[in-house]
Each structure stands twice: as C-alpha cells, then as structure tokens.
Image (cartoon, helix red, strand yellow):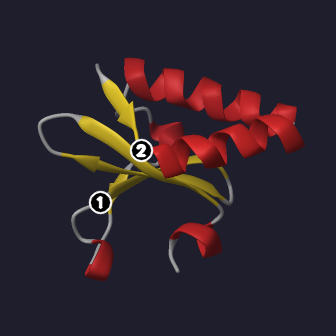
Amino acid sequence: MQIKIQKSCLRKLNKYKKKDIHRYRRILLKIELFKTDINNSSLRVHKLTGKYGNYWSFSVEEDLRIIYIYKDEITFVDIGTHNEVYR
C-alpha cells in the first residue's frame, strides 16, 4: 500500500526522531503494521466524526495518534497526542 506523508506531518515525525528515539521507533513499527494489516486491532483504526469527518485515525500508543485521509490513496496529515491533533 502506497502512503504519502504531508510535509507538516513529516516535520512532526522528524521532531520525534530528535527528541524521543524510542517513541519514533514505535511510530515506525506501527506504520509498518498499518501498511501490512490495516485492520489489526492494536491500531484501533476508526473514522472520525464532526469537523474531522473526512479523516481516519489509528493509535501508535495510548495517547499518540496518526490522522490520515483515505481516498484513492492514504495520506498521513498529522501525528501527535490527542490534544495536539484534535484542536
């Protein structure tokens, strides 16, 4: 599965790489799992509602999410804690 990453999301991912390498590695592992098994229950994939109704989300860890758009392809648009991505 082809996945694109918006520049703003890539910048956030690089910040995790610099400030918390362990969390960065967990993010990469979850992205690989997402690529191979989008329906894996540990990802807790779900469609968002309300003003985020066009987006989907999956969990990296308890309070760390990746938000994406799923149209013809998947595009990651944001990564962060619940409060950071649902502002």
Helix, strand, or loop for circle 2?
Answer: loop
32 left or right of 23?
left
**Residue bearing the label numbered 2:** 6
Q: Is residue 26 above or below residue 87?
A: above
Residue occupying the point 29% across, 81% down: 51
Q: Nearer the viewer, residue 64 or 4?
A: 4
Q: Residues within 10 Å of mark 1 (few under 14, many from 20)?
A: some
Return the x and y of residue 15 as percentages of the image width and height: 75, 45
Q: Is residue 30 above or below residue 9?
A: above
Q: Nearer the viewer, residue 15 or 29?
A: 15
Label placed on residue 28? none
Residue type highlighted by circle 1:
Tyr
Mark 2 vs mark 1: which is more N-terminal? 2
Return the x and y of residue 19 as percentages of the image width and height: 87, 44
Q: Is residue 3 above or below residue 81?
A: above
> Does the residue at mark 2 contact the one at mark 1 (Cβ under 8 Å)?
no
Count of numbered marks: 2
> How far, Cα to Cα, is label 2 from label 1?
14 Å
Return the x and y of residue 50 as percentages of the image width and height: 28, 82
19 left or right of 63?
right
Helix, strand, or loop for circle 1?
Answer: loop
Return the x and y of residue 63 as percentages of the image width and height: 68, 60
Q: Nearer the viewer, residue 9 or 58?
A: 9
Image-quadrant location for residue 52: bottom left
Image-quadrant location for residue 71: top left
Label placed on residue 55? 1
Q: Residue furthest left?
A: 72
Residue type highlighted by circle 2:
Gln
Instruction: Name the quarter where the N terminus is drawn.
Output: top left
Q: Residues within 10 Å of mark 2 (few under 14, many from 20)?
A: few
Residue occupying the point 46% across, 39% down: 41
Residue occupying the point 43% across, 32% down: 40
